[in-house]
Amino acid sequence: MRRIVPLLSLLLLTAPIAAHAVPLKRVNVQELERLLSAVQGQPDNKVAKLVAGLELTERASSVRVAHWQSEFPGHRCSEAFLLLADSSAFLDLPAADIPATAPPDPQAQRTLLAQTVEYVKTAITRLPDFYATRKTENFQDMPGRPNSINRLSDQSSERVLDTRDSPHEPLLDAGKSSVTVSYVDGQEVAGSKKGGDSFGNPSVALTTHGEFGPILIAVLQDAAKSRVFWSHWEQGTSGTFAVFRYSVAQGQSSYRVSLPDVSRTDTLFPAYHGEIGIDPATGAILVVTLFADLLPPHQHAISSILVEYASVPIGGKSYICPVHGVALARFSVLAEVGPVNRVGSFPATRLETQLNDVAFVDYHQFRAESCVLTDKPIGEPDAAAPPK
C-alpha cells in the first residue's frame, strides 16, 4: 500500500533547556468563566498571568475564545487565551457548547459525506499555484520536574521519568518561526525563513506537513476503509457545522509519524482517530483532527494534529485553505540527571511535551509577470512527498 505524505514529523536537534514553574490548576470551561468574571476590568498582565496558570479539562470552542479575547482585548491576554485553547484542542467540548439540533437522518449523513469526498477531489485540484506565510510559535513544558517518578521497564534499557502522576506543568514559549510555503502543481514546497525569529534551543523540533490538501485526502481515504460516524453539530465563528468522528486501524493508516525516542527516531504508521468538521451547505471541510493511537513501546507518547480551514482570497478569487493549526507531541528525551555510577545502570529519560500554534497568512498567487530572479532558492520539495 502506497503511503501518503507525512503529516507529522519530529526531528531531533539539540540539548533541552532547564527551567522551573508552578504546576497548573485544572479547571473546566464553566469554572474558567467564573474566574474571568471575577477579574473583569483588571490589568492585562494580571489577567494573562491568571490564565497562564490554568489548564482546561474540556475543549474551548472558537466561539468561546473569540468572546474571551473581546472581553480582555490586551495583547498578553490574547496570547494566553490562544495557548489555553490550543492545549485543549484535542479534548471534548463541554455538553453546554453542543447545539441541541437534531442530527441529520442516516441518508442525509451519507449524502453529506459523499459531498465532502467530491469536494476534496475537486477543490484541491482547482487550487492555483500560490505562496503563503506559515507562522509557527513553539511551546515546551519543563524538563527538570522534581516530582517525576522513576520507573524501570523490563522491556527497555532505560529508566523512564514518567510524569503522568505528577502535577501538570505549563507550556512556555520556546521561540517563533516564519517561513514562506509554496503550493505548486499540487505539491506543498517548504520555503525560506522570513525575518529574524527562530526557535530557541528545543531538544526536538516539531513540524507538520500536508495541511494544504494531502492531509484531507489521507484522512478521507483511510476513514472510508475504516469507520466514520456522526458525532454532533458545532457552533463556529462563521456558523454551525457538522462533525463526524472516525477511527482508522493500524493496517489502514497513511498517517506517518517520525517519533524521536532518545537516541533514535522511529517512523510509524499508527492507528489514529479524530473528527472532521463539515460545512453542511457545501461539503467543505472546515476542521480536521488526528490523534495517533500509539502502541508499546511508544504508549506514553502523543502525536496529534488539528487544522482549521476558511475562505481566503487568492488572485481575486476565494478558496478554502488552512488558516490555523495546532500540533501536539509528547516523546522521550534524555533527562537532565546526575551521573549514575553503579555498574549496569541505564540512562534516564523523561517525557517532553511540545505544542505548535501555526497561522497561515498572506496568501498570494504566483503570476508569470511577477516572477523575480534571485540567487536564494524558495525551497526544496519534501523528499517524502508522494509522486505526482
Image (cartoon, rainbow, N blue to C red):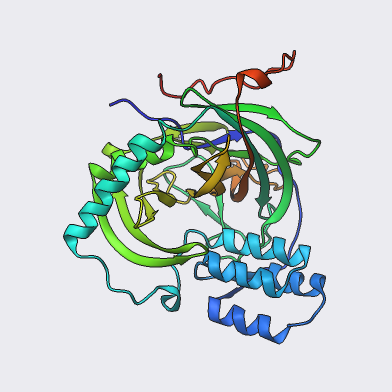
Q: How many labels does the image show?
A: 0
Q: Position of residue 299 (x, y in %)?
A: 42, 49
Please tell me which residue lies in front, 222 or 339. 222
Comparing 338 with 147, the one in front is: 147
One can see residue 130 in this view: yes
Q: In this view, does 200 lie to the left or right of 105?
A: right
Which residue in the rendered view is the most extreme toward the left? 107
**Above or below 255: residue 90:** below
Position of the N terminus, as image quadrant, is top left
In the rendered image of this protein, does residue 226 appear above or below residue 168? above
Q: Residue at x 71, y 60 (%)?
A: 79
Instruction: Where is residue 125? Give x, y as percent.
Output: 40, 30
Above-or-below relation of 367 to 35 = above
Residue 42 pos. (x, y %): 80, 80
Q: In this view, does 1 lie to the left or right of 385?
A: left
Q: Which residue is drawn at 66% across and 44% down?
A: 136
Q: Can residue 167 be seen in this view?
A: no
**Residue at the (59%, 45%) spot, across then down:** 349
Q: Which of the 4 quarters of the picture holds residue 54?
A: bottom right
Residue shown at 82%/76% (left/top)?
A: 43
Q: Is residue 103 above or below residue 35?
A: above
